[in-house]
Image: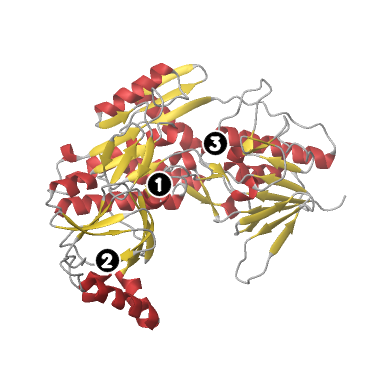
């Protein structure tokens, strides 16, 4: 028998577990390759616990090489899938050369990517929550918000710093807002100038109750428990837009805040969107054997990127337990194809549903039983501890959970991201870019919309798309001597003083253009005040 090449795309539950099962089912001479951007597998159900520090940052991840020792791991991004030629092109590595990976059998487990389309400002100011980096960034921003609020003396900026908005009342949104609420209220004890009563955590959900996946009784219990702990719940509403200082809801309500987390549904990864094959609602359409329709016997799909149904015709939700069973079915069917035996049919309806509410409380719906409160929380932790792959990770998480019961939350802030020199800021009508007297630390270029320059309530200028402002204070190293507000919904390019000074020094024409503009604005027209900033 000729050597078979099995290629797996994606390192989530579907991809990693498919590799693990294939290693057990196939002989040693079978080549198994897995392509993933990171070299680790993230245990998603415990990712919200990283926010509060209930588990360590690396406790919820496991090295793929240890989980799948026989599998060849390639740390690249998938760029193109050619189903006809049976090759997959991946991104460049150390050498700028195109790499194509041939296959005999392909498993597509690419999951989904965050989709903020249709919601202005979410790309610039909304925080997704899908990866380990997202969890670390969210935790760091929470600690930073508390530190800034502790020294802020003005009421309005302080209120924005201590307001946290989470959009989406499904499993992810509920568990994230519960962890945020627990963490900031507990951590606030270490900041003597913060009153816990000032803290606002708001959960926004488009339905008439949170946790629509669960029975009504458990959903109402979850709502009551979260509200009792101080979480505000906005039902029958959704996040429409966000800016650096507010969240705008579809109902018209505006929540002043500097912290927005969105758990909006993901869309399929770009390589899947460009595939010429049968799809359902954008996802890869599979048959009962989890084969890609039209490419049976060669291509399989698993997880969030696939449209999968049970024998009864029910759609399979994108949960870890379903992805693991799908991976097991796919591994068995690849082995059956190679060995010419009968294929397996996927028909797993799920064992139950679990959701943590924080503070030693949860809701559970398992095998017909309904649990809530402490018992459900204990069951939740037990189930996920047993499911966590790797004995070393089980021990680490068990120890972390025990220490979390007796020790205060860790307030160490890890700033691993480099400071952005150029960014985009979304503004809603009437929102202030900067005020008179503020530090001149950035230059702005309007990408779309309009902004007005004000001093003493009088309009000095109206700026439109393509025009810039803010350069006068940066060039003169002085504070702002005017206020700039958006008059329409606008997007502005923000160039930090550091980058602006570097461009001015390295590109003389760049500096000269802004010097000329500043000089022109410093010379008012006859009878008009200068439009300084």
**Dot 3 or dot 1, earlier in sequence:** 1
Compute the Cα span from label 1 to label 2: 24 Å
Vertically, is 99 above or below 23?
below
- Measured as percent of width and height from the top left, residue 114 is found at 49, 45
Secondary structure category for the residue under label 1: helix
Q: Nearer the viewer, mark 3 or mark 2?
A: 2
Q: Nearer the viewer, mark 3 or mark 1?
A: 1
Check disc 3 and report the residue beneath it: 320
Secondary structure category for the residue under label 3: helix
Number of the label disc, if any, that sits on residue 470? 2
- Measured as percent of width and height from the top left, residue 216 is found at 41, 17
Residue at 29%, 55% in the rendered image = 451
Vertically, is 349 above or below 155?
above
CB under 8 Å between discs 1 and 2: no
Does residue 451 appear left or right of residue 120 in this picture? Answer: left
Q: In the figure, residue 252 lies in which quadrant? A: top left
Does residue 469 appear left or right of residue 93 in this picture? Answer: left
Vertically, is 518 above or below 30?
below
**Dot 3 or dot 2, earlier in sequence:** 3
Secondary structure category for the residue under label 2: loop
CB under 8 Å between discs 3 and 2: no
Residue at 15%, 67% in the rendered image = 527
Compute the Cα span from label 3 to label 2: 49 Å
Check disc 1 and report the residue beneath it: 122
């Amino acid at each position: 028998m000729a050597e078979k090449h099995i290629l797996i795309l994606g390192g989530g539950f579907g991809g990693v577990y498919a590799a693990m099962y294939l290693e057990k089912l196939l002989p040693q001479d079978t080549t198994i390759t897995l392509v993933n951007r990171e070299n680790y597998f993230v245990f998603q159900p415990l990712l919200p616990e990283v926010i509060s520090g209930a588990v360590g940052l690396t406790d919820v991840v496991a090295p793929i090489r240890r989980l799948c020792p026989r599998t060849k791991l390639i740390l690249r991004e998938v760029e193109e899938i050619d189903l006809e030629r049976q090759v997959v092109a991946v991104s460049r590595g150390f050498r700028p050369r195109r790499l194509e990976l041939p296959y005999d059998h392909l498993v597509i487990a690419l999951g989904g990517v965050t989709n903020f389309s249709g919601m202005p400002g979410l790309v610039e100011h909304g925080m997704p929550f899908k990866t380990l980096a997202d969890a670390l960034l969210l935790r760091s921003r929470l600690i930073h918000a508390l530190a800034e609020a502790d020294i802020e003396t003005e009421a309005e900026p302080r209120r924005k710093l201590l307001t946290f908005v989470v959009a989406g009342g499904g499993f992810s949104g509920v568990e994230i807002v519960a962890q945020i609420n627990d963490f900031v209220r507990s951590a606030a004890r270490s900041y003597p100038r913060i009153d816990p009563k000032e803290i606002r955590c708001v959960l926004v959900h488009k339905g008439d109750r949170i946790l629509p996946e669960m029975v009504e009784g458990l959903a109402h219990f979850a709502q009551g428990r979260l509200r009792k702990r101080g979480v505000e719940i906005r039902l029958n509403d959704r996040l429409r837009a966000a800016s650096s200082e507010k969240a705008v809801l579809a109902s018209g309500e505006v929540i002043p805040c500097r912290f927005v987390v969105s758990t909006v549904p993901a869309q399929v990864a770009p390589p899947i969107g460009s595939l010429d094959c049968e799809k359902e609602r954008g996802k890869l359409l599979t048959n009962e054997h989890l084969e890609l329709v039209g490419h049976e016997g060669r291509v399989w799909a698993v997880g969030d990127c696939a449209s999968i149904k049970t024998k009864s015709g029910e759609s399979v939700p994108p949960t870890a337990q379903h992805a693991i069973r799908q991976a097991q079915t796919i591994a068995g069917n690849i082995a059956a194809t190679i060995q010419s035996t009968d294929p397996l049919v996927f028909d797993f309806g799920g064992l139950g549903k679990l959701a943590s509410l924080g503070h030693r409380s949860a809701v559970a719906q398992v095998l017909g039983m309904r649990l809530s409160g402490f018992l459900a929380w204990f069951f939740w932790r037990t189930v996920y501890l047993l499911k966590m792959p790797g004995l070393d990770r089980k021990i680490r998480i068990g120890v972390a959970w025990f220490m979390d019961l007796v020790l205060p939350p860790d307030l160490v802030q890890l700033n691993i991201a480099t400071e952005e020199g150029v960014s985009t800021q979304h503004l809603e009508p009437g929102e202030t870019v900067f005020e008179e007297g503020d530090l001149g630390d950035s230059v702005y270029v309007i990408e779309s919309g309009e902004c007005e320059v004000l001093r003493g309530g009088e309009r000095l200028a109206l700026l439109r798309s393509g025009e810039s402002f803010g350069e006068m204070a940066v060039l003169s190293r002085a504070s702002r001597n005017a206020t700039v507000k958006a008059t329409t919904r606008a997007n502005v390019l923000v160039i930090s003083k550091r980058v602006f000074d570097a461009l001015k020094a390295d590109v003389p024409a760049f500096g000269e253009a802004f010097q000329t503009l500043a000089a022109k604005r410093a010379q008012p027209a006859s009878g008009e005040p200068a439009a300084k900033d």
